[in-house]
Amino acid sequence: MSAVISINGREDAGGTRSPVVSGSPDRPLAFGATGGVALQDFLADVRGVAALLPDRPFAVNLCEDRYRFLVAFAAAAVRGQVTLLPPSRTRAAIDEVRAHHPDSYCLGDADACGCEDIAPLPHYLRLPDLLPRGEGGIPDVADDAVVAIGYTSGSTGAPKANLKTWGSFAASTAQNIAALDGLLPGDGGTAHVVATVPPQHMYGMEMSVLLPLVGGVAVHEARPFFPVDIAAALAGAPLPPLLVTTPVHLRALVESGVALPPLAGIVASTAPLPPALAAAAEAAFGCEVRELFGSTETCILARRRTALDDAWTLLPGVELQPQPDGTLVRAAHLAEAVALADIVELLDGGRFRLRGRQSDLLEIAGKRASLGDLTHRLLAIPGVRDAALLQLEPDACGVRRLAAAVVAPGMCESSIREALRQAVDPVFLPRPLRVVGSLPRNETGKLPRKALLELLSAL
């Protein structure tokens, strides 16, 4: 294989290296409609694709097929290339990230490259339908090599870059195995995962890419979206599988009434999971629903069983230090402490409660409230299916009013506002409040602030 090249163009000087995938040659790494893929076959695909990649330092992996994403990510890593993870696969998001990395290229598994814009992406490599194969040993990667740069979702502002090394990914994956304790086979069997979240998202990267590579898990090759497709993918697992999903997908599953096969469990992340939804899912599917807490900056940090507990349990080795404007996070996989905007209340036994974000704290006319609490009260109104609140820029008088977009079929704006008036102080009533058909959530259910502002301005 070619030498590992760091992102500053210097050859790797040595140091600790680890295999790009671990386990026995015949252990299952992926499964799906075409059958299973063993680790040794995956490695042959990785070696073959690595030889195809252009000699550029950065790659944007747009593969829709999860197995092909896995192959392309591993091939890029062993070539010393950094995988860029935009906050979404819209053309605007891709172009914005590539503007910071003009020497990058894109690769994908379709002519349309998973991008909404019909204009061709420059330097786009489409993987062949039949992946090439190569011979050799197990490729390795320097532990201190940057293998990915994840960009935050932009839900609270402009997306920010976060560098991830192979060593930090391996350490965080070990913690994630601990987060899944009790949901994975304890008898040495291979856990099988079906994920609805895209692999390009950091949660999807952790739960459906890194777990198969270094955690001994087999993952379904596709990303099922509709409830019937999710049920079919789960039914194709040889053992009761773990469903990795989001609150948006979980709500759709519960409301659809679709029958699911026996599950090892369900994990959810990317947005707050309402306790009522967690309880409904446990009742409907007969398994534990475990919520995971993390961020692009830190990876997964904590877990909780949301149907029963409002407190989070930190993963082993993670420490939190409350600050006036947020929280400092320290963990073995983090090179330095990371500051989050979340405000926490520390409890005994490595537990904590979230108390919102500093940016969510509102003060209008001398009165204070939490944006999260106001959103919760809006969602509690009968008939409201989805809603989002945000604080607008100051008006001519310097007042930062609230605006709301609400999905509530059959309801009018005045009735929603009147119901909300019974639950909140009038100064916090959103003006404007608009009823919409749907919210512009991205693939993981997040709401970029820019998209929400554009929706409200268009009404």
Image (spheres, grey):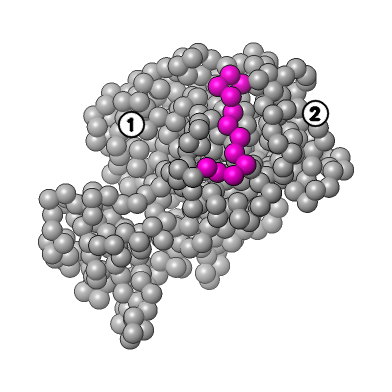
Nearest the viewer among 393 and 332 is 393
Q: Which amino acid does label 2 sit on?
A: Met
> Which element carries disc 1, helix, strand or loop?
loop
User: Which residue is painted at 37% across and 27% down in the image?
Assistant: 230
Nearest the viewer among 311 and 117 is 117
User: Which residue is painted at 73% across and 33% down in the image?
Assistant: 78
Can you tell which quarter of the image residue 117 is in?
top left
Mark 2 — residue? 1
Q: Quadrant of the N terminus?
A: top right
Looking at the image, which residue sits at the far right? 13
Q: Can I make out residue 259 in this image?
A: yes
Horizontally, residue 47 falls left or right of residue 298, namely right
User: Which residue is painted at 31% across and 25% down in the image?
Assistant: 228
Q: Where is residue 338 in the image (x, y as percent from the top left)?
A: 62, 58
Q: Quadrant of the C terminus?
A: bottom left
Q: Position of residue 85 (x, y in %)?
A: 57, 45
Q: What residue type is labelled 1?
A: Phe
**Is residue 160 a member of the stretch shown in magenta?**
no
Residue stretch rendered in magenta on the structure: 120-131
> Which element carries disc 2, helix, strand or loop?
loop
Mark 1 — residue? 226
Gap between marks 2 and 1, in whole Å?
Answer: 41 Å
Horizontally, residue 148 falls left or right of residue 357, namely right
Does label 2 or label 1 sit earlier along the sequence?
2
Q: Can I make out residue 303 in this image?
A: no
**Is residue 123 a member of the stretch shown in magenta?**
yes
Q: Where is residue 330 in the image (x, y as percent from the top left)?
A: 64, 54
